[in-house]
Image (tube, rainbow, N blue to C red):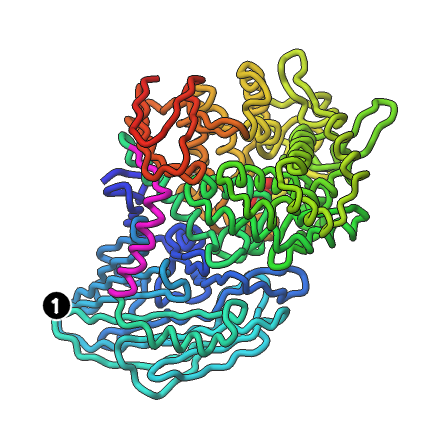
Amino acid sequence: METIKKHLKTETGWEVINEHYDKMQAITEGSNFMIGNGYLGYRGTFFEDRKDAYVGCIVTDSWDNADGKWEELATVHNALYGTFSFNKTPFSMDQNILDYSRTLDLLNGLTKRGVKVEINDTIFTLEEEKFASMSDKNVIAMKVQITTSKDAVITLESGIDTDIWSINGHHFQKETPFKYKNDLGTISKTNTYEDTIVVLEKNMVAFGKSVQKKSGVHKRQKTISLKANTPLVWTKFMIVTNSNDVLDPLKEAKTIYDSLISYDTVFTAHCQAWEDIWNKQDIQLEGNMVDQVGIRFNLYHACIATPTHKPLPIGARGLSCQAYQGAAFWDQEVFNLPMFLYTNPGVARQLLKYRYLTLEGAKEKAKKHQYEGAFYAWISGKTGKELCPDFFFKDVITNRDIRNHFNLWQIHISPDIAVSVNKYVEVTKDEDFLIKYGAEMVFEIARFLASRVDYKPRRDRYEIIRVQGPDEYHENVDNNAFTNYQTKITFDIALSYLNRLDKGSIRSIRDKIDLTDDEISLWEDIKDKIYLPTPNKDGVLEQFEGYFDLESIVPASKVTERLIDPEEYYGWPNGIAVFTQCIKQADTIQLLHMYPELFDEETVKANYDYYEPRTLHFSSLSPSVYATVAARMNYLEDGYRLFKKSLMIDLMNTNEAVSGGTFIGGMHTAANAAAWQMVVLGFAGFHYDQHHFSLKPHLPTSWKSLQFNLNLLQSDLRFLIDHHQIQITPLKMNNPISLFINGKEVIINHKDVTINY
Ligand code: BGC
């Protein structure tokens, strides 16, 4: 056994084991030990738990606005609910626990609990396991096994808990219970979009017919005389269907019910689906078991958070809770997408298609604010309309709302999407996507940017004023380097598509969106004249105009001493970071992370050295960006320190769930997916600069070797890297791949290649 942290272990690098029950950690552990399949997420709670333990089954495409303020995904009725008593003493985790463990089995997407209690001289053992089927997304399966050391009478209750946890109000206007065959279900209708959600249980043991309803639970009972040491097995399925996916969710739920034969058959298909995922996405690490399990833990969560059944966003907290509204931020393209792009491009396509399907929402937003084209929502849910409220945080000293401008000024989300579209097209050569969706999106984004930039005649240049870069503590800034470069690159891409696409396709896209020659000339002009900050005499790019004039506090953490109240917001308009160079998260370094080729290595180092000590890393998105850049520069100590910080954000969390009165708990989905980036783009030094693929590894000393697969230009390659050698094995080749290893070109065709570096 290897220790991850106190009470948290791994045995093989494929599981996280917790041997200490602590009720107070319910928020964090419910997220860390959750199960999911991209369609729904089910928190890592126990079957007898109720809403005070933050039980939650969060379902995609179930947005609803219950309190008139927040649109969020609904948590649905809990059909895995059950209780039992033993010789009339009800079981609970408050009893005298002799032995306890909880395991998240990453290989098989399974969460388990084992507990032993002593009640009136009898030892009573319970084993519970659950999985959200990866092969049948509407199904969660649970198996509970109970054994007693002496003969005993067990009373088991099974039912549906309708009194559920929901952060911002009750989401159902109508709830109708029903019976199907021997089991119970509910049909609920959401308030805003009137979606119908059906939840149905299927017990594989027969329960009594009479249904009781007590404190929101519809339940039935069964009493069993159990012989000593003879296990009682209770298998139960929970089926969830949604009218957004099927015409008749009730009929669909019943059909699924009828098709469920046994726990084992569902489990076998589920494991096969996970095997396919791991075959593509696993990273194998030799030499450090804790890092190994940390990486897999993060990849597991990145996968279960990602809808693959239809184009939908990845929520910033995945499906682990309702926080952040189950909606997409720039996190989706910049943090989550790369792993899928290079390992499972079908998923990347689907995510980008979601952005295409929400193009209308982005156009409406642009129009509302007097711009043209597509201004993507900072927080984007079902339709792409802006979900980010104007008032997000509270000034805890005056108790007044703070007007944040994430929705209006964090415009980089639009070019972030455009450059991701292009990267996807370049790496996959998916011309079909480009013609059907990609070019139109990029043109509409370029159109927006053309209406958003300002021409300054005296300087004969275009500037972008009043924005907010990725660093959210500095709002209302001008010429944020990250935003300006992303904008310029978007114009390069848009203009390149005019030549790259065949004449027929380009004509029909231009006709569709009415793209004129005058607009194209304007794009040309902006491309040539947009202001791109250049490094100062010390090689450092200014994050935005005037940033260098702000008070420099190093290390940035010292600024915290100025807090009057620990809950104070650091940013706009008067927070303690606003008039200093202390930044919330990677901003200029984000640019260098995405485009290391823009500057020479000395400049990248100068920027890293300047900005890292000024960064608070108060966004979970930040450490991975610095870790990746540090690893590439062979700053191994820093790279590894920040890698661990990012990797362990969730595993080391101790219930930090509420900030300024807002629930922010749940999985840090961007950081989860960034684990892949830190390893592959950071320590292995893999990069695609729009022309070449390259590799430049610098492995941490404790790692013996690293193995992962990439899908490039529709070919599959396996990479095995140690401290001296790189072995590349072609698995499925459609195109020869040119790869620059430490600057030297290698062509990979059908044979294994081994290179010393
Ligand atoms: C970060 C943003 C991020 C959002 C959602 C914020 O705290 O500053 O960059 O998009 O969280 O993860």
Q: Residue furthest bottom?
A: 210
Q: Is mark 1 within 8 Å of ligand 1?
A: no
Give the residue at the far right of this rendering.
Answer: 458
Classify 741 as above or below 20.
above
Residue 258, quarter of the rendered image: bottom left
Q: Quadrant of the N terminus?
A: top left
Looking at numbered disc 1 in the image, what kind of residue is underneath it? Asn
Q: Main secondary structure of the magenta part?
A: helix
- Of 585 and 582, nearer the camera is 585
- Is disc 1 surrounded by few (<14), some (14 to 19) or many (20+) residues within 10 Å? some
Q: Residue at x 33, y 34 (%)?
A: 730
- Secondary structure, mark 1, is loop
Residue 607 appearing in the image: yes
Magenta segment range? 264-285
Image quadrant occupied by the C terminus: top left
* Residue shown at 54% from the left, 37% from the top: 423
Q: Is residue 419 magenta?
A: no
Judged left or right of residue 677, residue 726 is: left
Location of residue 463 in the rendering, given as x and y in whole percent from the top left corner: 77, 30
**Which residue is pictured at 42% across the width and 52% down the height?**
304
Q: Answer whether residue 272 is magenta in the image.
A: yes
Compared to residue 251, the image places residue 109 above or below, namely above
Q: Is residue 65 above or below residue 707?
A: below
Counting from the top left corner in percent of width and height, residue 138 is at 41, 66
Q: Position of residue 283 (x, y in %)?
A: 34, 38
Q: Is residue 497 above or below residue 132?
A: above
Question: Is residue 637 visible to us here?
Answer: no
What residue would you read off at disc 1?
229
Q: Which quarter of the picture shows residue 480?
A: top right
Residue 482 point in image, percent of width and height:
65, 31
Q: Quadrant of ligand 1?
A: top right
Please name whichever residue, 488 or 554, is drawn nearer the observer in this view of the structure.
488
